[in-house]
Image (cartoon, rainbow, N blue to C red):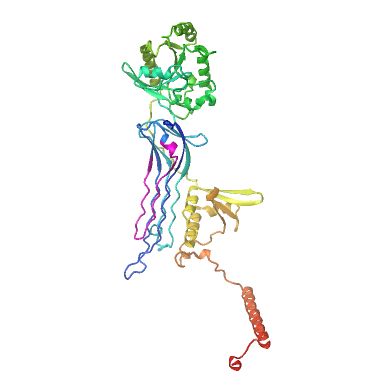
Amino acid sequence: MASFVDRVVLHVSGGDGGHGCASIRREKFKPLAGPDGGNGGDGGDVVLVVDPQVTTLLEFHHSPHRHAPSGTQGMGDDRQGAAGETLVLRVPDGTVVKTPDGTVLADLVGAGTRFTAAAGGRGGLGNAALSSPRRKAPGFALLGEPGEGRDLVLELKTIADVALVGFPSAGKSSLVAAVSAARPKIADYPFTTLVPNLGVVQAGSARFTVADVPGLIPGASEGKGLGLEFLRHIERCAVIVHVLDCATLEPNRDPISDLEVIEAELAAYAGDLEISGGAVPLTERPRLVVLNKIDVPEARDLADLVRPELESRGLEVFEISAASHEGLRPLTFALARLVAEARAAAPAAEPTRVVLRPRAVDESGFTVERREDGGRVWFQVRGAKPERWVRQTQFSNDEAVGYLADRLARLGVEETLFARGATPGAEVVIGDGDDAVVFDWEPTLLTGSELLGGPRGTDLRLEDRSRPTRDDKRKQYKDRMDAKAEARAELWTERESGRWTDPEVDA
């Protein structure tokens, strides 16, 4: 069973908001004492928080679906619904949050860094909050909004100052074990290391971290040999160390060719520029070369042979033996110097600024677009407010539908529909996708308190109260007279045929 997971697909959804309550207070001698329906509670958020004690995404690999608690419904007597608790998901330091198409949403670096993965829905208002001097006793309440649902990709990218790269069995794990207290698995076969290992190195007063990246092979930048899984852990490192095996027995292998292959893979790999430490390409970062296993006589001779060529390329070269610890002290101090230079060159961290972006004066908050497809013409309304109001409306309640019409009219939706060429009976769509609401538009000529005289839960605009014309009355009268004449003729026919009898005579 896997114990280290550095990439998962997480399905998160915020809690749904509780519905508002439509209630009327009833007291002694006051059967209708006013509305007292409470508001519904807000749904809980799903929040990712960096925890230094967490080192893997294994928990989300086994349980990828996470849902925050929903808010409860409001109740009478002005009792508010309870809000859903925030669902906190703890992730390792260095976790990158992406969309399924690869867009970086957040780079979680530093203990306590938070990111709201899915927001909870708002609770609906009760009829007590909807009452006004004109609408004294609303017969409806607003529904709670559903929580936000998202699919996120979490990638763990190791945070280390130095990355050790090289072919399998080059001695990277042995080097980490020799210069730090880390104890990675070491064996005499390729791909012993399957997960990155971190070690803390102390060189004088300097302290830095070293990452043992699993071995790379030709084609790693294209995903061969799990190359992409390994290369992502190099993106944050400030210094790259090439560990070259001078004692390999494989054919067509030598330190120079190994270096060129690994450099080509690093150049071909395209990382995330938006993450911390990922703005500088891998090929432009400080690097040095380590010729390992010089405790073997043939390896020492090969190291002395290739060292001048490597130095001619401008590379700093160190000959070491991870087994005998020869040459490790100069190497650690050289790494400490490069790390200090990289830290000094890094831009100073700026405090997070709160940016206020007020809405423009001429911004209406919604858009109305005329669309046509296959001869079908409709008008699509998009905007945060109209779409939220539609989700909160209980369409089985006529008064709630009328309240929605009033809100849309006050927002200016009807005027914009007129300006776009909409006519009575035109098809209007509010929203997009499966949650959109489609209706035939009828302009609201009358709005406000003059239509609130009916029973609670009704709206006079939705009732058929058209006054019949004189011709309609004449037609209705003629239809009634014709129906009566037909009924008399049918009864007379039945009587003449003897179907009617006198019970007393028959007895």
Highlighted range, magenta: 59-88
Height in image: 200 above or below 16? Answer: above
Asked if the stretch drawn in magenta spans residue 66, the answer is yes
- At x 50%, y 54%, the residue is 408
Please report the residue visible at 34 percent of the width from the left and 57 percent of the height from the top: 79
The residue nearer to you, when weighing 493 against 425, is: 493
Question: Considering depth in this image, is 94 or 144 the residue closer to the camera?
Answer: 94
Main SS class of the magenta portion in the image: loop
The quadrant of the image that shows the C terminus is bottom right
Query: Hey, which residue is sitting farthest bottom in the picture?
Result: 505
Using the image, determine if residue 428 lies above or below residue 24.
above
Quarter location, residue 20: bottom left
- Residue at the image position 36 percent from the left and 46 percent from the top: 85
Q: Position of residue 21 (x, y in %)?
A: 40, 58
Q: Can you say whether 184 is above or below 480 in the image?
A: above
The quarter holding residue 465 reads bottom right
In the rendered view, does 286 fall on the left or right side of 53? right
Q: How many marks?
A: 0
Q: Nearer the viewer, residue 294 or 455?
A: 294
Which quadrant of the structure image shows residue 143? bottom left
Quadrant where the image shows the N terminus: top left
How far from the left and from the top, in percent, is residue 266? 50, 21
Where does residue 270 sit, x and y in percent of width and height? 51, 26
Is 111 one of the magenta-colored residues?
Answer: no
Q: Residue at x 64, y 75 (%)?
A: 475
